[in-house]
Amino acid sequence: MEVDLSYLEKSIRFIKGVGPGRFASLQRLGIESVWDMLWHVPRHYFDWAAAKGLDQIRVGQVNTVKGIVKSISLTKSARGTVVVKAWLEDGNAGIVAVWFNQRYIKQVLHPGIPILVTGKVNMIRGNPELWVSQYETLNSGSPAYRVGIVPFYPSTEGLNQRVLRSIAYQVVQEYAEKYPDIIDPVARKRIGLIDIESAIRNLHFPKNVLDVEPARRRLAFEELLLWQWNVRQLKNRARGELKGRGVAHLGGDELVEQVISALPFQLTKAQRRVLAEIRDDLTRPDPMNRLLQGDVGSGKTVVAALAAAKMAGDGYQIAFMAPTEILAVQHYNSLLRLVSRVPIRVALLTGKTPYSEKRKIVEMAKRHELDILVGTHALITDTVEFARLGLVVIDEQQRFGVKQRASLVGKGKGYPDTLVMSATPIPRTLALALCGDMDVSIIDEIPPGRKRVRTFFITEAAKSKLYQFIRRQVNKGRQVYIVCPLVEESEKQDLLAATSLQQELANCVFPELRVGLLHGRMKSPEKEAVAERFRQGLIDILVTTSVIEVGIDVANATVMVVEHAERFGLAQLHQLRGRVGRGGDQSYCILVGDPKTEEARTRLKLMETTNDGFEIARADLEMRGPGDFWGVRQHGLPQFRVADLGRDTHLLETVHREIAAGLTIDEELAKALSRLHRMENKVNYNQ
Ligand code: ADP
Ligand code: MG
């Protein structure tokens, strides 16, 4: 039976005190219905209960006091500031309360009314004055004006806190008890959640500040639960539609074993586990849809190559797409090396491939004369066709649009298996939550024997020492990256910063060394040429923008310097650091920065102490919130009213655990509530 929640969608216009003007203001705040008002979260609260007597005032501090207005005056200072002063008394003492540029206060206050004020007390010409930051008159009969904790809401012009609070009060009084609770009492008790009615009441009008957090937690849980319930619905639907439509790849295992035994190293435990998950998927008749996550250098490419070997061995083709030319070439070379001892045919197709060559490769793919085709976006052009596409591998999936991914998958007849790889170490819970339609495999182990990259955070002042250090490294035959930050909104400026640094280093600081430049504005062939010269050791110091975040793999590069490190996200810094430490030599990452805040400082310090991408990602998420999660490129992480994906990771874990454990959810109620929450806009991350 469909659940009718239309009463929660009743227009806010019908609430007492909401006329056309206020309705327009409410709309600007996104409040159209009573439901919107219930989920309009106070920005903070104010506890008037903390008010003290006027004889307890402390000069130089913020005081909250209660008094009776005795007189009011309005004056204008020489500079035009409107000053309202009120003399307050409480029987024991008195003080002047001062408002600046709030002419209307003169109308609000009358002699005789009780008032609560809070603000800093300053000594002005020998007399204490309380400069009011918040106040509350106590003459209204409404309980929303009670002496106690009052909410302060995000607001807009034409709506003062008093009005908004009174609207909220009416709505909460009438609707909190009518709000359906989707979590049954037994489950609530188990999870440690309060009921929805109390949560709504305490979010808006808590009796005690300690009641706010449980309310917030309950409402955040509601949002995360509905979100994940929808993601799951979507996943089940997709699964249902695709069920049995793929190919059960039973062959190819000998080839996998051959490639493994030819490897110059042992697979790590994590690689073996993840490979088993993938092989298991491939042997099923349902198309695989899997995200392979792992830190830079954790060995994802090897795992993808082994999956490819199985498919080639089973008589199918593999399309392997990377976001950049440099990366495609690198994958091509790695794959060639990895499968060199087995009969697997690999080809490379990029925008740079000469026309005649391209025609030949396209023809070979069509005739099944090659097994693995590695490339860039060039793979999704019209002319490319596969005789028997079995597996699509996409590296750095977040750099491709959904359509591009789909069009590569669409090159197969039927439904090929898909493996997407990402080096952004998203905490598992979040990965699962976001990649609703995908399974997730995580390589959480770095191959043994790697030297930890030593990381130092230095200030601009230590630059000359840094240059000496760089010179010593280069004299030892090593190479160095110097990365300049991407200046937001201005690629041009960005380019300038890198260009002028390169000039300065080449002409003034290291005239005897070879200093190269690589930036995002360069044309592909030019970029590739510079990268190639760096690879061949013809450039000692490469000044670059964050274009190298994915791309160059030079084992001889041992120093990564990041300029203005405070402008980068932690996840991004970690990616950059992953560019060094690829050879046997001790590598270094030097973060140069002048962090302005304690938080920025803490972030850079964290880089010094850990090399674990997942730990860094978690910290980044907690400190900067999900908005900045992927650095410059934003990826439409869903926005919630109460839940915060950075702060509420544990709650999200609880949601997953509960769903997995079979938490009973009334489907029709979940549907109706999801509609109110507009959840359909929040689950399309990977669609
Ligand atoms: P990713 O794609 O995750 O960045 P790669 O697959 O490119 O990592 O591997 C990085 C480097 O580590 C490559 O040079 C690869 O040959 C090497 N490598 C991969 N797996 C192992 C392992 N188990 N033991 C030692 N070296 C490994
Ligand atoms: Mg890789």
Image (tube, grey):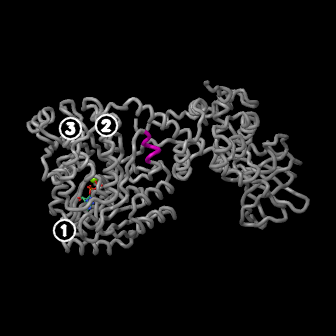
Residue 384 appears in the rendering: no
**In which quadrant of this rendering is ligand 1 seen?**
bottom left
Residue 477 shown left or right of residue 40 in the figure: left
Asked if the magenta segment contains residue 435, the reply would be yes
Whether residue 306 is visible: yes
Q: Is residue 574 magenta?
A: no
- Are the residues flagged by discs 3 and 2 in contact, CB closer than 8 Å? no
Residue bearing the label numbered 2: 405
User: Mostly what secondary structure, the magenta segment?
Assistant: helix
Q: In which quarter of the view is residue 120 placed?
A: bottom right
Mark 3 secondary-structure assignment: loop
Q: CA distance from mark 3 to mark 2?
A: 19 Å
Magenta span? 431-436
> Which structural element holds mark 1?
loop
Q: Amino acid at mark 1?
A: Leu
Instruction: Say which quadrant the C terminus sits in.
Output: top left
**Classed neighbour count for the residue bearing mark 2: other residues with Cα under 10 Å, few (<14), some (14–19), many (≥20):** some
Q: Which residue is mark 1?
A: 513
Position of 408 relative to 583 (above/below)? above
- Horizontal side, residue 92 vs residue 455: left or right: right
Q: Is residue 271 above or below residue 172?
A: below
Under mark 2, the amino acid is Arg
Q: Disc 1 beta carbon < 8 A from ligand 1?
A: no
Residue that lies at the very extreme toward the right in this rendered image:
91
Which residue, given by chain and number where applicable, does mark 3 sit on?
316
Residue at mark 1 to residue at mark 2: CA–CA distance = 43 Å
